[in-house]
């Protein structure tokens, strides 16, 4: 990936057009080193110009290997439909599902001042309808209000951004200085609405049950009627945080796929930031606003084939 997000997106759309005749790929698996300006801007651009049918999954805060021969901030594995495929070759489809695990706490705030260095953001936020400023003590008191919360808790800001379409993004909270709050990632603007979120086991377990139901309905739709699709594989991009909040239940995040598609190969990776776009069914996170970069979540990629 070039340093310019526009060039990265241009390479993807050009490749897709050359093979399928359409700028929108069937699916993209994306890996990025951090939630900086490159991945944030690239995801926003792809989300704006690509079909809602394009599934995008991945990890936006990870280390990766590649054979491109130059330093890269991000890489993408792109799947496209071949418009010139020979007769007798079947069709592959990609679908995604999202299990959220964050609980909103406290009041809503408006961002009144913001600056970033391309990787992190410093901001000031004021409670809506009040002069009260959000500070670190308020954040940590809210986060540890419930007993039994792990001491290594990671807290996030959920930012609702108003533009051509309402979007939503999560940014990890790191602390404050004398004047402002520091969070990971960029893309926050003055006037954005902010709420504090923390991982929550009840939210995660409820969301996992919903995803399992979605996959069950999806499976029934794939195997009924004249067109029979076979699910042949899956991938899961699973937050490293979730194991701390779903205790005593091994493989709980993989259970929706394993229970609904027994015997089908499932692989995956643990993440510090999950990419997810193009879901089977609207999730609770999506109802807050259109969101592609997640936290404390599990993103599932389901691959199916029709002969």
Image (cartoon, rainbow, N blue to C red):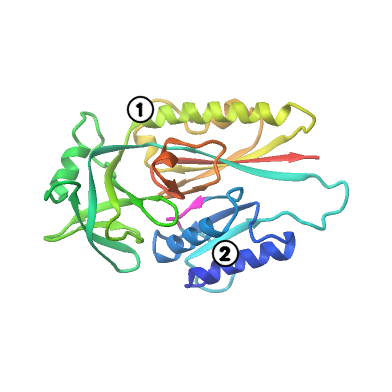
Residue at 52 percent of width and 48 percent of height: 277
Q: Which residue is mark 1?
A: 202
- CA distance for labels 1 and 2: 38 Å
Could you tell me residue 145's position as x and y percent? 18, 33
Instruction: Tell me if residue 117 is in the magenta stretch.
Output: no
* Helix, strand or loop for disc 2: loop
* Vertical side of 187 occupied by 230: above or below: above
Q: Nearer the viewer, residue 195 or 75?
A: 195
Examine the image and state in which quarter residue 121 appears: bottom left
Give, as a single range, the part of the protein colored magenta: 58-62
Q: Nearer the viewer, residue 189 or 302?
A: 189
Could you tell me residue 96's position as x and y percent? 57, 41
Q: Which residue is mark 2?
A: 66
Could you tell me residue 74's position as x and y percent? 50, 63
Please state if 287 lies on the left or on the right of 70 as rendered.
left
Residue at 58 percent of width and 56 percent of height: 50
Q: Main secondary structure of the magenta part?
A: loop
Please state if 46 lies on the left or on the right of 14 as rendered.
left
The circle on residue 103 is none
Could you tell me residue 20's position as x and y percent? 73, 59
Residue at 40 percent of width and 43 percent of height: 240
- Sequence-earlier tag: 1 or 2: 2
* Mark 2 nearby-residue class (10 Å; few <14, some 14–19, many ≥20): few
* Helix, strand or loop for disc 1: helix
The label nearer to you, 1 versus 2, is 1
Residue at 52 percent of width and 58 percent of height: 48
């Amino acid at each position: 990936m070039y340093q310019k997000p526009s060039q990265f997106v241009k390479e993807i759309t050009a490749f897709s057009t050359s093979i399928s005749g359409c700028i929108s790929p069937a699916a993209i698996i994306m890996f990025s080193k951090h939630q900086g300006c490159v991945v944030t801007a690239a995801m926003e651009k792809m989300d704006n110009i690509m079909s809602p049918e394009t599934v995008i999954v991945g990890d936006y805060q990870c280390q990766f290997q590649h054979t491109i021969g130059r330093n890269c901030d991000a890489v993408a594995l792109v799947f496209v439909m071949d418009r010139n495929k020979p007769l007798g070759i079947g069709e592959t489809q990609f679908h995604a599902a999202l299990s959220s695990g964050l609980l909103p706490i406290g009041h809503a705030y408006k961002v009144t001042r913001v600056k970033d260095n391309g990787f992190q953001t410093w901001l000031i936020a004021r409670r809506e309808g009040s002069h009260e400023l959000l500070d670190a003590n308020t954040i940590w008191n809210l986060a540890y209000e419930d007993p039994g919360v792990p001491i290594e808790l990671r807290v996030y800001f959920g930012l609702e951004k108003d533009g051509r379409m309402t979007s939503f993004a999560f940014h990890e909270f790191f602390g404050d200085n004398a004047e402002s709050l520091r969070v990971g990632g960029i893309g926050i603007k003055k006037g954005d609405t902010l709420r504090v979120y923390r991982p929550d086991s009840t939210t995660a377990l409820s969301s996992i049950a919903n995803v399992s139901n979605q996959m069950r309905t999806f499976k029934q739709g794939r195997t009924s009627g004249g067109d029979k699709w076979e699910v042949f594989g899956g991938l899961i991009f699973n937050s490293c945080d979730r194991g701390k909040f779903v205790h005593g239940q091994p493989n709980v995040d993989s259970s929706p796929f394993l229970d609904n598609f027994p015997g089908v190969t499932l692989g995956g990776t643990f993440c510090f930031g999950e990419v997810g776009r193009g879901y089977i069914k609207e999730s609770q996170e999506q109802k807050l606003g259109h969101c592609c970069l997640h936290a404390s979540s599990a993103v599932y990629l389901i691959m199916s084939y029709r002969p």
